[in-house]
Image (cartoon, rainbow, N blue to C red):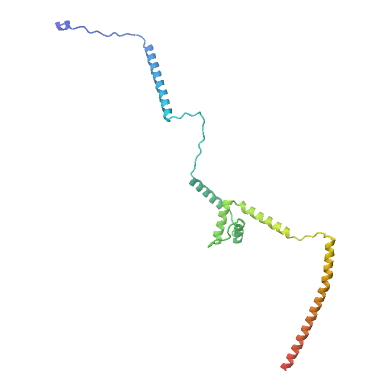
Amino acid sequence: MSDEEDMAPAMKKSRVFYGSLEEKERERLTLEAASSAVTGNDAVKAGIKAGNINISSGETMEMEERVSERQQEALAEFERRRRARQITVSTDDAEVKAGLRALGEPITLFGEGPADRRERLRSVLSVVGPDALKKSRKDEDRAKRTHDECQQTWYHEGPASLKEARLWLARYSLPRAMRRLEAARAQKESLEATKTIRQQELHKSLR
């Protein structure tokens, strides 16, 4: 060794301690868990305060599928056309007009033909239902039967005063009617006799 090496101070070496690090590791993990819990709670509180986190009471609400009004109208129109295709309408134009009249619709429109009229009846029935025409016809039949019953002749026994009044009318009217008929026959015979005389005179003048 040289003189310079002998004069240099000696370096202190760090001591190495051997043993279990379990206690130190447990302390470190406990500190990390505590700090993370505090940090997580603070973050949740900050999110609730800002309105980004909404904690409910556990109640649930069923969400309905909302369809726009245009889609509902399109579906309703499609369903109406499907029902219209399934409705059978008579090909007799008179029956079609009667059906329209029973439903309170105009019998015919300007420039409308039998096919258009039949299609219009089918369209109306698709809206009000095919049973509406049957119900309307039943109501018409019921009203007709009621009208016929009101017009039906019926008899009942009248009081004695009615009988006396009719006998008085007969005694008053029948003799006068007989005299009028006799006068009419006499007038007719005289007219025929006068007509015969005139014809004879005409023949004589022609000779």
Q: Quadrant of residue 151?
A: bottom right
Mark yes or no: residue 116 visible. Answer: yes
Looking at the image, which is closer to me, 157 or 100?
157
Q: Is residue 51 above or below residue 74?
A: above
Report the quarter where the C terminus lies: bottom right
Looking at the image, which is closer to me, 175 or 32?
175
At horizontal 55% and vertical 52% (from top left) the residue drawn is 84
At horizontal 59% and vertical 61% (from top left) the residue drawn is 93
Q: Is residue 59 above or below residue 3?
A: below
* Residue 24 screen position, x and y as percent: 37, 12
Looking at the image, which is closer to me, 129 or 171?
171
At horizontal 83% and vertical 71% (from top left) the residue drawn is 174
Q: Is residue 4 above or below residue 40?
A: above
Q: Quadrant of residue 106?
A: bottom right
* Residue 21 screen position, x and y as percent: 36, 11
Seen in the image, is 110 located left or right of residue 170? left
